[in-house]
Amino acid sequence: TVPGRIDLSAIGLPAGATFVDHGDGTGAFGWSNRFDPPGPHGIVFQARDSLGRTDQTTTRVVARGVRSLLLDRDPGYVFIDGELDFFTSDDGDFGAAPGSTNHASLVFWNRFTTTSWRLDFASPPGEALGVGVYEGAVHPSSRGPGQPGLLVSGIGPWCDHGSRFEPVTGRFEVKQISFDPAGKPAAFWATFEQRCEGAAPALRGEIRFNADVPLVVRAPTHAGIVEGESL
């Protein structure tokens, strides 16, 4: 039996997603979102012929934002090797540790080495962690009234030295932050500057976890047109 026209549809589209049936046996799926929620989403694509017969397939879609870690140290900062490191999802796995609305913990595991990094950002006691600049940061476990917390640590020699009260000073700026229902960061973006034991050399960097994708649009500074032509 000739099936006739094939109608295509999508079931279970996440918020902001669309599916267009072109009418020729093909369709187009599109999704413009801000990575919240990122998924995974099980989307069912269905085909129905003129006799009412259907066939389906399920596709798993995950929309993640930018995940990257930049580490840039001053000469003399002895707690990591090298001066500049930049990691993305191609280099390892990024994750978020359970926390609270006043403490965000991000982790990175390098799949090519035994290196891992943990980054802790905390607001002053009694305050929620939000977008903004946090000056005068100390070790998260040493916070007093009005003091934010910061600790960037990894395997091997690092600022914490295994003691949660090791002197740490610094500052950080949270550019984007949201939490999931379990209290883990769903999206996070921050820059930071950390000094250990009162030393002058600093570790600077940036962490992006499911952060918004940077979009830069540039227009020409000038254009030439013919008289009477629309610009």
Image (cartoon, rainbow, N blue to C red):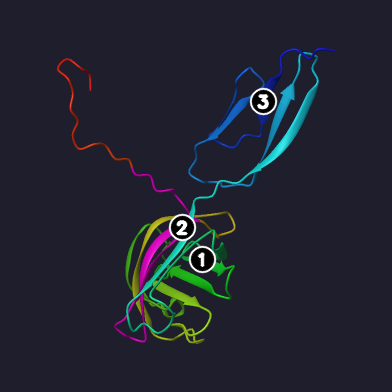
Image mark for residue 188: 2
Q: Residues within 10 Å of mark 2 (few under 14, many from 20)?
A: many
Q: The N terminus appears in which quarter of the rendering?
A: top right
Pick whichever of labels 1 and 2 is earlier in the sequence: 1
SS under mark 2: strand
Q: At 34% across and 75% down in the image, what residue appears?
A: 170
Q: Where residue 8 sits in the image (x, y, percent)?
A: 68, 23
Q: Nearer the viewer, mark 3 or mark 1?
A: 3
Q: Residues within 10 Å of mark 3 (few under 14, many from 20)?
A: some
Image mark for residue 12: none
Magenta includes 214?
yes
Pick whichever of labels 2 and 3 is earlier in the sequence: 3
Q: Nearer the viewer, residue 129 or 38?
A: 38
Tell me whether circle 3 and circle 1 mark residues in contact (CB < 8 Å): no
Q: Nearer the viewer, residue 137 or 157?
A: 157
Magenta includes 136?
no
Q: Amino acid at mark 3?
A: Ser
In the displayed structure image, the side of residue 5 where residue 222 appears, left or right: left
Q: The C terminus appears in which quarter of the rendering?
A: top left
Question: 5 above or below 131?
Answer: above
Q: How many callouts does the rendering have?
A: 3
Question: 62 above or below 97?
Answer: above
Prevailing secondary structure class for the magenta stretch in the rendered image: strand
Q: Where residue 99 sits in the image (x, y, percent)?
A: 54, 66
SS under mark 1: strand
Query: Which residue in the protein does label 1 denote?
Result: 106
Q: Which residues are magenta?
A: 187-216
Q: At 76% across and 13% down in the image, what residue appears?
A: 50
SS under mark 3: strand
Residue 11 visible, this angle: yes
Tell me whether circle 1 and circle 2 mark residues in contact (CB < 8 Å): yes
Image mark for residue 9: 3
